[in-house]
Every structure is written in structure tokens, then in C-alpha cells.
Image (cartoon, helix red, strand yellow):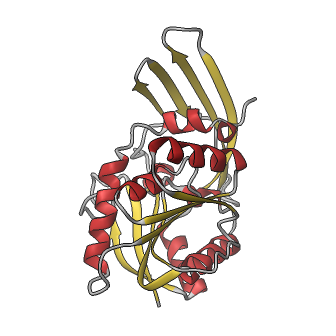
């Protein structure tokens, strides 16, 4: 068994179906919409950043960017990737529920459903408290979560298996098996991950892991926000576009918060 988070290059490859530059453009557009009167975004913090693709893209566009992640391999990879790309990126190894950086940011983001690593309501509330404490005046916290229908509906929004190509590298990814049942009490599932990577026609390399995943509903998110009391929602989207959460085309649950 190989930990997928111990192989940041493979993890980044698995997620390379995402259009990160386009997503960052949308995030900045939402900032222009929801933080009027405060000027352009100058500082950004990405939480549970992993390879920090979004933080690196923000840095390319000018804002001072910081990436925070708990996993040392991810932090090392993010720092190295930023250096190779010629962008300035501060990387911090810390916990998304307890971090205290001593400064505030115009924008804080948590992408790719990384809130699924928060296993309890107390942890989620502590996370929201920490995010709010790091917002500058007019600052926003934007969190991207999976769409509730992925676990509650009969027709999930996102496939659990996909294929990616990058240069001469081909990879198939399966994130979750039909047997990976959600525990009805804890709402945690142990998702089995299998990734097969073939580089330049060489022998395939297989990565296998079991990743605990905590499913959060929209009403539980609202409960965590009320318990924290530090944030209020100012926008909710079902995609990196202006579609509602209940739109049939919605595939994510993205909420824009500001400090109370």
C-alpha cells in the first residue's frame, strides 16, 4: 500500500483534469463581486493546499501567496514546484484547524473538497474559526466542497474513475469503490484509491491507498457556520460559474464567506 499523499507528483497528475488558471480567474472574479470597495486581492492563503496549484497560480498573477498543508511531502513538493516555476510562494506545514500565522489575508481558499479531512463537527468549527481569524478587512473565505448528491443522490455529479494525459504520461485513476460505504453514524467512508501511471510507454506503476473521507451535507455546513459564529455566507455556487447549487448541472458546493 502506497500513500497517495506521499507521492505529490502523482496526486497533482491525478487532479490535472482541473483547469486551475480558469478557476483562479473565477475566484478573483467573485472577490471583485463580493468585496467591493477594498481594491484588488493582494494576499492569498490556500489551506490544505497539497501541491498548491491554486496558490502557485495566484502567485503568478501578482498576489503574495501562502500555501498551508499538514503533509511534509506535499509542502516540500509545493515549494520545489514554485521555485521551478519562478514564482514566490511561502509554504507552511501546519494543521488547518489550529494554524496561527499572525497576519491576515484578502482571500483564504480551501479547494478540492479538502474539508473532507475534517472528521468531526468540532474540527470543522475550529477550522472556520481559524479561517475567519486570518481574514483582513473585506477579506473572503471561499471553500469548495463536493456536491451533496455525490453521496446522497442516485446520480453522482462526479465520476469516481477517470483518465488523464500529460506529455508522455498516461494515468488511470479510481477514487472510491462501490464497496466503500458511508458509515451512517459517522458519515465517514474509507475510500479505496487506485492509480496506474505509465510514463513514456514504460512499465505501469500502481499506487494504492485507503483515504478516510468525511461527507458533509449543506445543512451540516450551515450548522458549523452557526456554531462558529465568525463567518457569514455572501455567495453560493454549484460550479466555477454562476449556477445555483440546485441547478441540474451543478457538480460542486462552493460557498463564499466574509467575517461577521
Q: Is residue 190 visible?
A: yes
Nearest the viewer among 160 and 12 is 12
**Can residue 245 be seen from the camera position used here?**
no
Residue 15 or residue 71, whichever sits in front: 71
- Compared with residue 153, is residue 16 higher up or lower down, i.e. above or below? above
Q: Residue at x 66, y 56 (%)?
A: 184
Q: Residue at x 57, y 80 (%)?
A: 103
Q: Residue, x 29% and y 80% (percent of image)? A: 39
Quarter assignment of residue 192: top right
Q: Position of residue 124 (x, y in %)?
A: 63, 71
Q: Is residue 173 left or right of residue 61?
A: right
Residue in the image at 50% along x and 77% along y: 222
Q: Is residue 127 above or below residue 36?
A: above
Image quadrant assignment for residue 162: top left
- In the rendered image, the vertical position of residue 11 relative to residue 169, given as above or below: below
Q: Position of residue 140 (x, y in %)?
A: 42, 77
Which sits in the foreground, 113 or 101? 101
Quarter holding the N terminus?
top right
Q: Position of residue 191 (x, y in %)?
A: 64, 41
Query: Please, which residue is most extreme toward the bottom here?
Result: 260
Residue placed farthest to the right in the image?
A: 1
Which percent across, then down, holds residue 199?
52, 16
**Relative vertical location of residue 96 with respect to residue 205 in this rendering, above or below:** below
Counting labels gives 0
Q: Quadrant of residue 63?
A: bottom left
Amino acid at each position: 500500500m502506497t500513500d497517495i499523499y506521499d507521492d505529490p507528483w502523482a496526486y497533482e497528475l491525478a487532479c490535472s483534469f482541473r483547469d486551475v488558471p480558469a478557476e483562479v480567474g473565477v475566484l478573483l472574479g467573485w472577490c471583485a463581486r463580493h468585496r467591493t470597495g477594498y481594491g484588488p486581492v493582494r494576499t492569498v492563503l490556500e489551506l490544505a493546499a497539497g501541491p498548491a496549484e491554486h496558490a502557485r497560480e495566484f502567485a503568478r498573477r501578482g498576489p503574495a501567496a501562502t500555501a498551508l498543508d499538514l503533509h511534509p511531502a506535499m509542502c516540500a513538493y509545493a515549494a520545489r514546484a514554485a521555485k521551478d516555476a519562478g514564482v514566490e510562494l511561502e509554504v507552511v506545514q501546519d494543521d488547518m484547524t489550529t494554524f496561527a500565522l499572525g497576519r491576515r489575508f484578502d482571500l483564504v481558499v480551501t479547494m478540492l473538497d479538502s474539508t473532507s479531512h475534517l472528521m468531526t463537527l468540532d474540527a470543522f468549527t475550529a477550522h472556520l474559526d481559524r479561517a475567519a481569524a486570518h481574514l483582513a478587512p473585506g477579506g473572503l473565505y471561499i471553500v469548495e466542497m463536493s456536491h451533496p448528491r455525490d453521496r446522497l443522490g442516485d446520480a453522482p455529479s462526479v465520476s469516481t474513475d477517470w483518465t488523464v494525459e500529460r506529455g508522455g504520461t498516461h494515468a488511470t485513476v479510481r477514487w472510491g469503490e462501490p464497496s466503500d460505504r458511508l458509515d451512517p453514524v459517522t458519515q465517514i467512508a474509507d475510500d479505496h484509491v487506485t492509480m496506474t501511471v505509465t510514463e513514456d510507454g514504460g512499465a505501469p506503476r500502481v499506487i494504492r491507498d485507503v483515504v478516510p473521507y468525511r461527507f458533509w451535507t449543506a445543512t451540516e455546513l450551515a450548522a458549523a457556520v452557526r456554531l462558529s459564529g465568525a463567518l457569514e455566507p455572501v455567495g453560493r455556487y454549484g460550479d466555477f460559474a454562476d449556477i445555483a447549487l440546485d441547478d441540474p448541472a451543478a457538480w460542486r458546493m462552493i460557498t463564499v464567506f466574509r467575517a461577521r
